[in-house]
Amino acid sequence: MRMAAQCGLRVARPTARRHIDSRSVRAMRRALLAIVGILVVVLILAQVFLPGIAAKRLRSDLSKQGSEVQVKISAFPAIKLLFNRADKVTISVAGLHTDDDTSQQAGGDDLPDLLAQTKAATKLDVQVRVLNDRLLRVQDVRLRKDGDALTANVTLLKSDIDQALPAKLRLTGSDAHGLTVSGSTDAFGENVDADARVEADGDGALVLSPDGDLGIGDLVSVPVFEDDRVAVDAISARSVSAGYLLTLRGHLR
C-alpha cells in the first residue's frame, strides 16, 4: 500500500463500517419516527377524549348539588387536564344549592370551596339561574374569571333580602359602593338607630359596617363573606324592578 501511494495510485478503503453506520442511522430514524407517531396519536386521542371525560366528571360533581348542569371544557394540549388544568371552562346550572346539610353529605361543596376550585381554569364562564347559599338566595348569577381575577353579577330579589336580614334591619338603597340598610341595634346596652352599609373592607372581606360616626367603629362591623382563598375587592349595586343588581369584583388569593 505504501508503494502504491508513492506511485500516485489511489487505494480503496474498507466500506463495511460505513455501511453498518448508515444502516444504524436509518434504524434510529425509523424508531424515532415511530415514537413521534405514537406520541402524536396519543395527543390526538387525548385532545378528542380528555375534555369530554373531564366535563363529564365535573358535571357529575356539580349534579350532587345542582340541577340541569351543562359543562364544556377546552384545553390545549388536552394532556394538561391530567394535571387538573384547563384553558377555559363554561358551566350552566339551573339551580345550585350550597346551603343545606344534604348537599354537604352528598359530597358537595360550599360557595368558598367552589370559588377556590376555579383556580384550575385560566378562563371561566359560569351561569346559575338560582343559587341558594347559607346566607342568601340570589338569581341570575354570572361569574367570569380571567387568570385570578373574578367578576360576578347577581340579582337580589327584595323578598329574598327581607328574608335574609335580621328582623330589625331593612334594605334602604344602593349605590356605587354597595347596599345600605337601616334599623336598630344594641350597642353597649343601648338601643341605637343606625344606618349600615354592605361593602368591601379593603382586606378581601365583605362586611356590614356602620354608615356614619357612631363612636364604636369596627366593633359593630359584621362579616358577610370572608375566606382565606377568595378576596372581594369591590361591590356596587343599582336598583332594578324586582330588587337590586350587584356587581362584585375580586380575586383568588
Image (cartoon, rainbow, N blue to C red):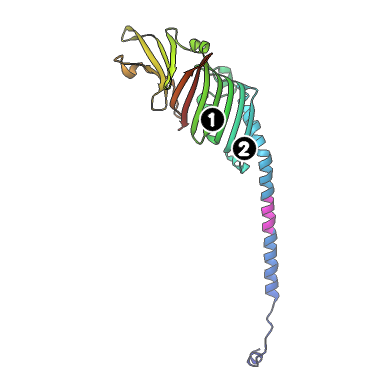
Amino acid at circle 1: Arg
Q: Determine the residue positioned at 42% across, 15% down.
A: 180
Q: Residues within 10 Å of mark 1 (few under 14, many from 20)?
A: some
Amino acid at circle 2: Ser
Q: Which mark is residue 144?
A: 1
Q: Is residue 33 magenta?
A: yes
Q: What residue range appears in magenta?
A: 31-38
* Residue in the foreground of this view, choosing between 42 and 216: 216
Q: Is residue 190 magenta?
A: no
On screen, 188 above or below 45? above
The residue that mark 2 highlights is 74
* Residue in the foreground of this view, choosing between 124 and 16: 124
On screen, 228 above or below 6? above
* Residue in the foreground of this view, choosing between 7 and 76: 76
For marks 1 and 2, the one nearer the N-term is 2
User: Is residue 177 at all visible to an observer of this figure?
Assistant: yes
On screen, 41 above or below 135? below
68 left or right, relative to 167: right
Question: Can you give x and y, in whole percent of width and height, for residue 146 in the image?
Answer: 52, 35
**Which image quadrant for residue 231?**
top left
Q: CA distance from mark 1 to mark 2?
A: 16 Å
Provide the secondary structure element on which disc 2 rests: strand
**Which image quadrant for residue 181?**
top left
